[in-house]
Amino acid sequence: MPCNNSPTEEFHISEIPSLHGYVAIVTGGNSGIGYETTLQLAKRGARVYIASRSQDRVNKAISDMKHDAGPLDLHFLKLDLQDLQSVKITAAEFMSKEPRLDLLINNAGIMACPYELTKDGFEIQWQTCFLSHHALTLSLLPVLLAAVQASGNMNRVRVVNVASDGAFLMGPKSINYDDPNMTSLTGATAPWRRYGHCKQASIIAAKAITDRYRPSGIIAFSVHPGIIKSNLQSHDTSFLGTLSRTAMKIAPTSTPLDGARTSLFCATSPRVVSAAGLYLIPFGKVDPRANKWLNDDEAVEKLWQLASGQLKRHGFAIDELPKGRAPVAQRRDAAQTNQQLDARVRQLEQLLGNIVSQMPGERRAANSQASGDFASSEDALPRGTSPQNLTSVSPPTGELEVKPGRMVSSNTEMIYVSGSHWTAICSEVEKIREHLDRGEAATQVDSDQDQSQSHGPMLLEGVGQISSIETIMADIPPKDVVDRLVSRYFNSTEPSTTGAENFQYKQFWLDPKSTSLPWVAMLFGVMGMGAFLYLRVQDDLPGNMGNPKDLMELFQRRSTECLLLSKYSTAPGTYSLEALLFNIQGEFIRRRDAHLGVWILGGIAIRLAMRMGYHRDPDKHSRITPFQGEMRRRTWALVLQLDTLTSCQLGLPCLIQEHQCDARPPSNLLDDDFSPDSTQLPPPRPETQMTPVLYTITKAKLSSIFRTIFNQVSLGRTEAYDEIMALDQRLHSTQRAMPPKFQIANPEDSITVAPYVLIRRYNMELLFQKSRCMLHRHHMAKAYQDPTYNYSRTSCVEAAMALLTHQANISKEIQVGGRLYRDRWFVSSLERHDFSLASMIICLELSSRSNEPSEPLGPDDQRGFLKFSREAMVEALESSRRFWEALKVGSNEARQAFDMLSVMLDKVSTNPSVQDNPQLPMQLDMNDSLQTQISNNG
């Protein structure tokens, strides 16, 4: 297929994620570009082997790197690229030391050498720059595949061939298959043309490797590093060589670090996955000039066969199976028949994990209401029904349908999500589903999984060799710097896992060496959050501490090591739970998307908390002081929210069974109201009075009803409608009882409030509207066949439109000059899940309207309750799509949402059957309808 996928933004070194657990090889990693590539990989936690002929030069490079960057996991690997037998020995030696290989950077090379044959009979540049690297790659396939299997990530294991623009500027138009040594070339330009020839082969080889082994989880790239000052041409004493060296001295050139950027981009970035097999230039852009070779399937296959033949003659065993590739002619024919929309839908299918099952009765004919505008939820009730007697409404049949959720599969895993999760809803959207149900063959499109999501939490994946306590303590910055980081955290508006009074910061500085490891782990967690708060508002770190992301990563590693050394999971003590919660918070902010590992860590925290009795109210236990008890209640409230929100985010059941817990919510008290010396707690302040813990208390109440709703709708059956309506009344009562400080009555009234208050209002409002969506989602689908459930349909659509309105407003406010610009990081994966849920509900509504008749069905037709027009909903989805488009680089979830909305909007815009009744009045704009809905709900 044609290869035109290109990352849209320039890559920066700061984007390199944590590489803890990675094993890498960099050939020629002791100098120039290779040196910087090795250094950056090792600084992010990778174990790196420098493959080179000279151990002395490698040892010198390792010494220099460690002097500049501190302890690094670096090793020497002997390799002579001008000897194919050495390549075999190198591969065997490596595989005797390591069970896996995640990254192979084929970086070493020579340039414009005079004609010479190696001992193996190949032109020296052809073998050094291409053939030996190709042989090394194939020889290391067992450990590359082992890394795929160990990580379970189909986009983690990568090969990078460092090529050059010399392939275009100096090389032939195509590979010389008859004479790859190019023996007939003469003249001053001959060495340069041979150089271009071998670099062309390296470019094509990356495509060939990707074609064969991508289905097995190995992808490859070729890169041009740029014009770099180096010693590659030092051997060329000809006039052309001298001219070249002179030009390099006076012309603009890049530093070796800049030269390494594109290699590092291809090796580590999740953004580059869609460009696998392609040729990239500084700094992370696809160069289409190479496509004349890469799109030529015969040329790619021919190079593979040429190299295979050369290596077989020297005793290499070559995998003959063209894995994952259909015959060339078949692929060409398929490419000619694919339509653009079909290709996008097939990509969507991969992004959603090949959803293949459909529960009985959930594919809706949707033929009970006509299109038009929704009125308020009360207008949607069956005739003769009032809001007061809603709980008496029962389903028309006595049978409760089963709603088992969805099993979502991909080529790497199978996962379960409940029926309330947004990815399950998309199965019911006919505009998307009709393409997902097609049985026609399709060219596989990989999911471009965000590689950062594959890096599990350090506590689960490990940090390699755990540092000594002395090394850990040495990474605590000077006290004046720590003071500012700690102050930034405790003076922020973020809900805290521990109170400042409970932190015992002064005692630490009196005798740091005697401090317990869990407390030190907590300190690193606090400093990590402090660094994050500096990063969030783009303030410089105190004390010239450098890049906040690097500092956060270091603090997270040290926090993890302290927890591991303290045996937190088998011998938990004071501060163990608080330290673990800080560690989980650090993992949460390290990634853009939801991650299973964070949920698993949350499960560990829950079990640890219950083991330590946090779920039981401390008043019943005399050994717990009033101060300790209140701090435990605050911590348990955060644990409950962690369980609820992360479980919902992944569509998985909550772990805590509240009927087994009796811990009361925390009291609305200022930190100054009580102390470790208090013999009893004072009466709580009224909830009209702001305290640091009031937001936690208020959110805990709303989270409790949300938790009840989520648990109810996640059951393996559909609830009786009276249960749904009882929960609906509880939800609205809880929302009306919230302190006015946390309610959005009118966005216009929020102009004068502090940004942190506005953020909290949005958080509470999003949780409320999400609760409505989840509560009524299943019965919304029933309403397309039975008007008994019209209230659920209107409630669901109203809530979804409210969420999309908030998404649009938040998107505007986090832009430069907006009220939330300095706090824009608050839009986390939790909030993005809410917006995805809302988008899928509106897609479901639009899809169902396309199948509804435009004429009344009879005297009982109840289309008078319709409110939001098709245009208003499409406009909301288009606004949402723009939001996801801005976030999709580096976020798999954002990319999924963008692709799904694009498919839906494309189908809606081209489907004449999705029309509103032209006689119905135009709908108010989304803000007006939102205010109507909020006022109707009290």
Image (cartoon, rainbow, N blue to C red):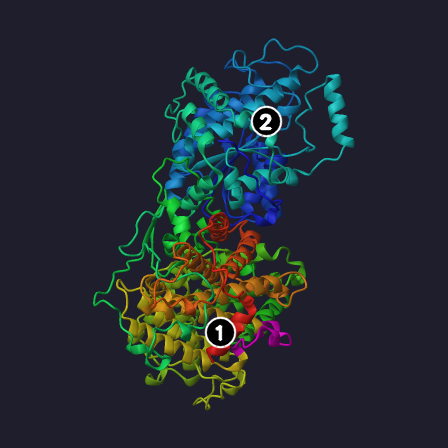
Residue 492, percent across and down? 58, 72
Residue type at mark 2: give it.
Gly
Name the residue at the top extreme.
184
Q: Considering only order in the chain, which callout, 1 or 2, is on the residue closer to the N terminus? A: 2
Q: Nearer the viewer, mark 2 or mark 1?
A: 1
Q: Determine the residue positioned at 51% across, 74% down.
A: 932
Residue 42, percent from left and from top: 54, 44
* Image quadrant assignment for residue 704: bottom left
Q: Is 503 in the magenta?
A: no
Which residue is under mark 1? 933
Query: Residue 205, percent across and down?
Result: 50, 26
Estimate how packed mark 1 is, as few (under 14), some (14 to 19) or many (20 or more) residues with alpha carbons within 10 Å: some
Q: Can residue 769 be seen in this view?
A: yes
| Residue at the right extreme of this rendering | 250
Which residues lie in the magenta part?
742-757
Q: Is residue 581 left or right of residue 355?
A: right
Q: Which of 802 and 24 lies nearest the eye of the viewer?
A: 802
Asked where in the image residue 581 lies, by quadrant, the reply is: bottom left
What is the distance, in whole Å, between disc 2 and disc 1 at their CAs? 67 Å
Task: Check disc 1 and give the amino acid type.
Answer: Gln
Q: Do the residues labelled 2 and 1 touch (CB within 8 Å)?
A: no
Q: Nearer the viewer, residue 728 or 648?
A: 728
Q: Is mark 2 on a helix, strand or loop?
A: loop
Pick the residue in front: 361 or 105: 361
- How crowded pointer 2 is (Cα within 10 Å; few <14, some 14-19, many 20+) is rated as many
Q: In this view, does 503 lie to the left or right of 388?
A: right
Mark number, residue 109: 2
Q: Say above or below: 57 vs 567.
A: above
Q: Can residue 711 be seen in this view?
A: no
